[in-house]
Image (cartoon, rainbow, N blue to C red):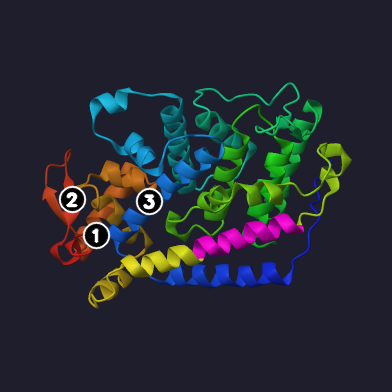
Amino acid sequence: MNWTPKYTITKEILKDLTKIETVKNSFDDQPLSPVLLSSLHKTAKISQTHYSTQIEGNRLTLKQVENALYTSNKSAKNYQGHDEKEVKSYYEAINYMEKYLDSHSPFSLSFIQKIHSIIEGSKKNIPYRDAQNAIYDSSDGALVYLPPETKDVPIMMDDLVKWVQDNINTLPTPIVAGLFHYQFVTIHPYFDGNGRTARLITSYIMRKFGYGLKGIYSLEEYYAKNLGDYYKALATHPHHNYYFGRNEADLTSWLEYFIRGVANAFTNIEIKAKEKDITGKADISPILRKLDIKQRKILELFTEFEEITSIQAGEYLNLSSQSARLILNKWVQEGFLSIVNKARKNRTYSLAKEYEKLIL
């Protein structure tokens, strides 16, 4: 059972792919203030958590989600109703995804299973559904969709992962991500958490294969702002039974919807970055341009800590403590860092004066 999706690359899709590529290349070449980057990244994660859970019925507002994730009030932290637990689990899954990205581990079925278990708040991987999981309209109880039979789920999931692995280097990443999203929710492999898992793994595919925009955008708002269009785009065939049309449906209309959403998200974040960035400081950009990728990344750590250790740096850069210590000492010699505490076991580092302005 090899999955072979049917679709056509239309003029609309080509136009939006070109727009996506233009914004992507602009971001790849443009150094952003670490403070701005950290702020946009945090905002994107809150937005992603809020809108993805809202689609599934979570009642918390965007502000309430932020408070649930970042509040320092002990009594508020201790209160965890269903909605609070749900957003915290989703946020934890985003954090796990980002660490997995930093580890450069391969896209795999086990990774999908781990993400799903975290989203569902489970410490163990949850097995595929062992019974039918029909989807009904909450307003009138009408049958909306009847997914594949349970016996077909494991094979279809294996085929989906293999399809991504086989095509990610030949097809545009947004096309692969969009088709994955569609097929995952179509298989509906679990009793619960299918939509949230599909959206998060879609984000992972975009970020892993070069379309992450530094992790500062989310597609979930695009879906949530008009749920009718989202569900209409996913319903590629009028028959509710998977085996009576959905299994051979033309996915062009879904891809047009999905790629348009990516293009909108990329354009919006480009506008937001330009609005918030300090373009008047001519000295900032040249300083950033002198830094390599690891140095720019470590600046993000300095937005949270005045001093860092080699252990912190190693975890953040996915290096061993020994390798991190060597690179930190090299940066001291180059004038990028200064040693604060010189004790060998408890040595700490801070940014050199010249670079402090980047995070102020």
Under mark 1, the amino acid is: Trp
Q: Indicate the secondary structure of the residue bearing disc 3.
A: helix
Under mark 2, the amino acid is: Tyr
Place of residue 3 in the rendered image (x, y in percent of width and height, measured from the top left):
80, 46
Under mark 3, the amino acid is: Thr
Q: Quadrant of the N terminus?
A: top right
Query: Closer to us: mark 2 or mark 1?
Result: 2
Q: What residue does disc 3 label?
A: 43
Q: What residue does disc 2 label?
A: 349
Label 3 vs 2, first from the N-terminus: 3
- Residue 214 occupies quadrant: bottom left
Label 1 vs 3, first from the N-terminus: 3
**Vertical comparison of 86 with 285: above or below:** above
Numbered range of the magenta stretch: 252-266
Disc 1 to disc 3, C-alpha distance: 30 Å
Give the left or right position of residue 251, taking residue 38 as reference.
right
Q: What residue does disc 1 label?
A: 331
